[in-house]
Image (cartoon, rainbow, N blue to C red):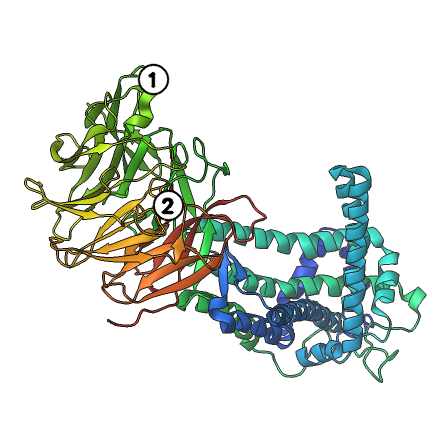
Amino acid sequence: MSLGTPVSATESPAAWPDDVFDQLKGFRGLLIMYGTAVRLYRHLLAVCALVLVPPFVALVAVPVALGRRIAFVNGAPVLLAPSPAVLWIFVGLVLTAVVAGFACLAAGSHLVVDHIEGRPLSAGRAALAVLRRPHAVLLLTVNLVVILAVQVGAMALMAHATGSIVAVVILGVLLVLLALPAVLAWTALPDRIPPLTAAYHLAAHDYWWTIRTIVVAFAAVPGLAQLGLHLLCAALPVPTGVQIGDALRMTAAVLLLPFQAAVLGCCYARLHQKNQARWGSVVIRGDKGRRGRPATATGGAPGGRRTRWWPVGLVLLPGLLYGGYAVAGPLSSVTDNAIAGEDLGWDLGEDGPGPVQIAFGPRGFPIVIRDRGFQEVTFCGDGTCGTQTTVILDVSFEEQSGAAVTPDGSVVFAGWVREPDEVERRELQLFSCRPDGCTWRPGPPLRTAPGDVLRLDVAPVNATVVATRGGIAVASIAPVSADRYPAPARVMLTRCPDLRCVRPQTITVGNLTVAGFVTNQKSRALAVATSPDGRPVIAYADLIRRKVIIAICDTAACGHPAIRAFDMPDRSSPRYDPRRSLDDLRLQVAVRPDGRLVIVHNGGGTGDTTIMLCRDSSCSGTPRTVASSELVTLSAPGLALDPAGRPVLAGYDAADPSVAVLSCRDDDCAGRGVTHLVPRSDVGEVDVAIGPDRRPRVVWYGTLDGRRTPTYHVLTCADAWCGLRPSPS
């Protein structure tokens, strides 16, 4: 008999003859059960629409209502500020959705049994047959929860007694096999008999066939479909990350329910047909007033009003709401994704997490550069770094190094290296990394410096790089002699008109004295940026004289740079601590769209971050200085400029344990607002960058709960202000 072929009422009290029930035992049984689901698909979707849509829509509505109290961390929603009331609401909605899913299976399998017996099909009547017995639904849920708790407890006892994972796995498999036939109890819900009793009597007739059918047809095939969808979503460059994948999997789970309901319905009908001798006159259908009444065959054809395709749109509603809102406006203020790769805990060669930098490639996706004793570059495959590619530059730079993203999407490194056979000289070299690997610039070094390996701390070196129009600019500091302490050093700028730096041009910018200090991190006393018209700007710290020095190039060639020097906070400050004036120094510079400079450093010895704001493009006069103590890191907070040219800092809130963003509300940063983003444990390096979409990205180090190993994260704000819009100046 072909799948779903109607038969006359005279052939059998049921619409299916006995030979069809017999065929359910072989491979053809899978085709018959799934073929039945296809034939009744619209009716089964109508059942799901009536039972599932309300609780699922409510479950989606709660995260939407909570809005900025939820963050997506590695694709999973996390409540940032949990409260008992919200947690209980979530627990209630999740349990309701789970029970609704089982109720949909029960009502759908009931409708399949109606089809098998030749009764008229009605999605509303099938759903009502289950929903009008809420006490039975609740009791069955409690029973299954108790069964699950007993299984987990038995496995925990076995693990404690034997200490063997193999024994626990074997016990778990056996318990699952024993409990699987209990899903037939949901099919028996509409009957006027205890559901678990019905499941027991039905499964007892052909237990192993029931197990095989439920494992393969009910669980394995839909599970493989979900797994394939998961792998497909992971392979595709979805801009909104895993949120769209979650919406698709939610929708697919609902669309697969008719097939699972058909499996349960067919199993129930076959076992009941084979078990008539034991049950006597008890029939499958248990409607009030019809118990024991013989079924009226209708040839298996659906009766009543024809079901249209409206259920399809209705069951897609929760997924469409979730996915659409994720695209149009993310469900939270932030999306946080951990950077994959080998987690070393504390970085190689350091007492803590090393320097980190975030920038943007030509496609507008973040690129994260980490110094972990070696250089690690992570190229993000989407705007939130949900997909990543990481390459390693296996080079150990001396002291400070720098990295910049060029217009072709590669990352250029400038740093001082020491060859194994070169103990008297250090070389300034260039390296380049792309998603397919890293290379070094051939040819002579950009600069050399003496380097007595036994006195390396006496004469530190620094280097940093910035991309310019068509090329790069490298700023460097190196001693001219290691025989004196403090050592005389020279600040130089090397301009490369092309990315290969075949013909570099080097000029001297200034002189200073340098001294090595014992610090926890690689101090970053040098920074370089470019103005909107392509002129390099160099900032460096003279810790001996306690000065911040700025060199502003007059042209792109920087023939006659203008030098400005400004004092760091005075040592007489009551908050001055000499240890803070040396450890973990970080100096940063940025150029506003109108050419004015912003310098940020933590070299004042007070523990505060100093923000220096130049009043004009030549930084004439004394810049406005703002001391900010709101954010802390192992070094200074990361610096970026918002679309209006106002400073944006990222770090860890000093008073509240969270990753936070400080936004200046005006050009002088007199008014400031701090936005708390995600909770954190551990303090590490932080950096921030504003993307082409005007949304800040923060790279930070640590964990959310303190229970996991600290690692680096990329945090993406949902809007340009991370939920706190500065007031206009």
Mark 1 neighbour class, 10 Å CA radius: few under 14, some 14 to 19, many 20 or more: few
Does the image show residue 331?
yes
Judged from the image, the secondary structure of the residue bearing numbered disc 2 is loop
The spot of residue 714 in percent (x, y) is 42, 51
Residue 606 lies, with reference to residue 187, above or below; the image says: above
Q: Is residue 377 left or right of residue 59?
A: left
Q: Amino acid at mark 2?
A: Asp
Q: Quadrant of the N terminus?
A: bottom right
Of residue 161 and residue 296, the one placed in the foreground of this image is: 161
Q: Quadrant of residue 559?
A: top left
Q: Quadrant of residue 371?
A: top left
Mark 2 neighbour class, 10 Å CA radius: few under 14, some 14 to 19, many 20 or more: some
The spot of residue 194 in percent (x, y) is 86, 70
| Mark closer to the observer (1, 2) | 2
The spot of residue 363 in percent (x, y) is 30, 51
Spatial CA distance of label 1 from label 2 is 39 Å
Q: Amino acid at mark 1?
A: Pro
At x 27% / y 47%, what residue is drawn?
588
At x 50% / y 56%, what residue is drawn?
73
First along the sequence among labels 1 and 2: 1
Judged from the image, the secondary structure of the residue bearing numbered disc 1 is loop
Of residue 207 and residue 73, the one placed in the foreground of this image is: 73
Q: Quadrant of residue 696?
A: bottom left
Query: Which residue is under mark 1?
Result: 420
Whether the residues at callouts 1 and 2 have beta carbons within 8 Å, the answer is no
At x 26% / y 23%, what residue is drawn?
426
**Which labelled disc corresponds to residue 577?**
2
The spot of residue 576 in percent (x, y) is 35, 48
Of residue 280 and residue 71, the one placed in the foreground of this image is: 71
